[in-house]
Amino acid sequence: MTVTSVRKDPEALTMTITTELDATVERAWQLWADPRQLERWWGPPTYPATFVDHDLTPGGRASYFMTGPEGDKSHGWWQVLTVEPPRRLELKDGFADDSGKPNDAMPAMTMVVALTERDGGGTLMTIQTQFPSIEAMERLVSMGVDEGMVAAMGQIPEILAEDTSSA
Amino acid sequence: MLIYNHMVVDSLADDQADRVFHALADATRRDILLRTLEGQHNVSALARRYPMSFAAVQKHVAVLEGAGLVIKERNGREQLVGGNVDTMRKASRLLEQLEAVWKGRIDRIGEMLADEHNGGPNP
């Protein structure tokens, strides 16, 4: 399995990761479309994910939780924005409270998954994660949500590199 | 997204992350940080590089210092400021952790697909 590239674009508030899959586009689509398959890779072995709902139709929702080694649960939700099987999936990924109800006080991120055929066989899968705004990212950080922080911190080398190249 | 909560533990305290954000939001401060990462600078000499007052530059340096991005030192009457390489190292470690989350997912997908090719357990 090859991660072809990881790119962070501070201007567009995005991180894009691209990978080559040894599978057809149709097979790769099932990784997202079938909740039982999703559960096998979304969470790490120490925090396996359980999808309670999973409705990949426009406007549809998914809800999931991840269970930690101490039995602790973290809840999340998806809202499906665009779905074009088997090539494109656009969704919002956000936080939920312990009952699984979306926590609207927390900013949600947009994820765009694109699957394309590779020359010579296989599938190229690109996942782009976008933050709604700098403010949302700052809020994620201030709320102690490390992902927002990680993404922001990840931008530091690029921000600095940009200034150098424009100087 | 939630696993990052658990995977990225205390690499930087939250309020420090806030300060880093704020510090990096300004072009002058980013420029100061870049220069000081290359080596220590005298604050007065640094101030002459920017079209603003000495006090304004001092303020920028203080914001960077508060974020842990630079370290100020006194050498006699001279005030020296240098980039905090340690913070930058932490930042790139965090970046690696974010990548690791997605690489972990991609590895698991790869194993699933490989199992199928080998006639192993199907989903």
Image (tube, coloured by chain):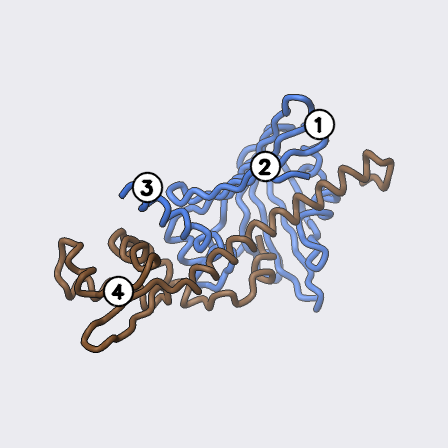
Tell me the residue that label 3 is attached to: A165
Which of the 4 quarters of the picture holds residue B24?
bottom left
Q: Which label number is shown at residue A4?
A: 2
Identified at 61% across, 57% down, the residue is: B3
Which mark sits nearer the N-terminus, 2 or 3? 2
Q: Which chain is brown?
A: B
Cα separation, mark 4 vs mark 2, equals 39 Å
Cα separation, mark 3 vs mark 1, equals 40 Å
The amino acid sitting under disc 4 is: Val
At mark 3, the secondary structure is helix
Would residue B115 appear left or right of B16 to someone viewing this image? right
Tell me the residue that label 4 is attached to: B61
Tell me if mark 2 has few (under 14), some (14-19) or many (20+) residues whose alpha carbon lies within 10 angstroms of its own: few
Cα separation, mark 4 vs mark 1, equals 54 Å
- Quarter holding the C terminus of chain B is top right
Judged by depth in the image, the label closer to the viewer, 1 or 2, is: 2
The amino acid sitting under disc 1 is: Thr
Name the colour assigned to chain A in the rendering: blue
Q: Which label number is shown at residue A24?
A: 1
Tell me if mark 1 has few (under 14), some (14-19) or many (20+) residues whose alpha carbon lies within 10 angstroms of its own: some
Identified at 55% across, 55% down, the residue is: A95
B43 is higher (above) or lower (below) than A129: below
Judged by depth in the image, the label closer to the viewer, 3 or 4, is: 3
Q: Nearer the viewer, residue B37 or A140?
A: B37
Identified at 67% across, 66% down, the residue is: A72
Q: Where is residue A10 in the image (x, y as percent from the top left)?
A: 40, 45
Which mark sits nearer the N-terminus, 1 or 2? 2
Judged by depth in the image, the label closer to the viewer, 3 or 1, is: 3
